[in-house]
Amino acid sequence: MSELALLGGRPAFEESLASRVAWPPVDDRTAQKLAELYYSRRWSAFDETESEFAEAFAKLHDASHGIFTINGTVTLQCGLGAYGIGPGDEVIVPAVTWYATAMAPHYLGATPVFVDVLPDTLCIDPDKIVAAITERTRAIIPVHLYGSMADMDRIMAIAKAHRLRVIEDCAHMHGGVWNGHGIGSIGDVGSFSFQHSKTMGCADGGMCITSDAEIADRIFRMKHIGYGPGEHPGNIRQPPPRDLKCYNFRATAFTALILHEQLHSLVERLGRYGAAVRYLENRLGQTTNIRFQKPGRRADRQGYYGWNMIFDAPRYEGIPISLIRQALAIEGVPVGVVWDPVYRFILFNLEPNAYRIPEPCTVAERLVPRALWLMHAYLDVDESDLDRIAEAIEKVDAQADALRVHAKAS
């Protein structure tokens, strides 16, 4: 095993993956369609480009209705708001997620309630959900995280028993399938983000999916200043319900067009991601002490926003995760850190009385500081590059003792 580049050895990649793999994808076909849209002057959300994409995206995920929005935060807000969730209510969310999952209930006046995650999937722990339910609980937001799906069978059973709504946060799980069902179609509403780095990414965008026609209508009106589907200025058939707060959360035809073009190749791309993960885990499972995030016990096709590695074996004790990350970056393999538990995240600025933590989130506190993830785009490389990714990771594992010495000397 050659020496780590951090310690003077030759890197696995002479040129980092970050400079070799471009995201999001671009192509001449999409560029031509964007030019045609530009010259048509039909740029707004009223153009049929949006409805065509929303319908196709919902169909892929086994839902009847898709509602396209400006981003994947307001999708959560609309999903909750469509059911009248607001002041005095509580919404259960996992401790490990992007902080927007918890801010969405707050924007409506509700209280986010943080519960712990499972150590194998890093997704919300159903047992902790049960323990956190009170007479004020109205909804659960399970998050399908990086390369794993929350246990939707158990979550839906809990929701049914306690008459709770389920808003699935699918920002990381485009195209995912759980036990034969498209992800996002299992709960009451599925929420997707198309932020630039996502598995389907553009400047920004979001999607709600549901098979409840009434809820679809309410979400559409919430995001479209009260307009119903198919309505246009000067052609409003009926006003929005009096109890519904409506906003301007509209996106544009340009982003809908870009995403619709990406949708055509999504399933094929996910197949390549899955093959790459199997290759890496089969090899590294035999050669390293790294633990990998599990996909979820009834997960079928994975969305793979990222591939998650957990460095919690005794071999890595005393080695800061930041140093492991630095060592991989110098090898040419850029990896990201998993977010801090939301209530510790630097951008989460709510006062302690604005949220609730029923019991310590010990799994999240222990595992988040030991996890690193490889972005999905770096899984779509050829086998020779996968070999070099594996080589870089194996070098870190094999030279853990040298890294520990380096950490003490730094």
Image (spheres, rainbow, N blue to C red):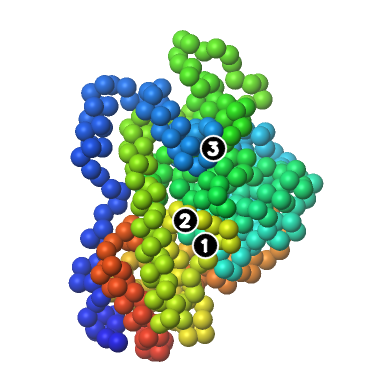
Amino acid type indicated by mark 3: Ala
In the image, taking residue 211 as reference, residue 317 lies left or right, namely left
The answer to whether the residues at label 2 and label 3 have Cβ atoms under 8 Å apart is no
Q: Is residue 366 visible?
A: yes
The quadrant holding residue 35 is top left
In the image, taking residue 11 as reference, residue 239 lies left or right, namely right
Identify residue for label 1: 295
Q: Is residue 27 above or below residue 247?
A: below
Q: Is residue 331 above or below residue 108?
A: below
| Label 2 crowd (10 A; few <14 / some 14-19 / many >=20) | many
Identify residue for label 3: 63
The x, y position of residue 156, in whole percent, is 68, 49
Amino acid type indicated by mark 1: Pro
The single residue placed furthest to the top in the displayed view is 234
| Label 1 crowd (10 A; few <14 / some 14-19 / many >=20) | many
Viewer-nearest residue: 55 or 7: 55
Q: Distance between the Cα atoms at labels 1 and 2?
A: 7 Å
Identify residue for label 2: 302
Q: Distance between the Cα atoms at labels 3 and 1?
A: 22 Å
Point 24% across, 77% down: residue: 11
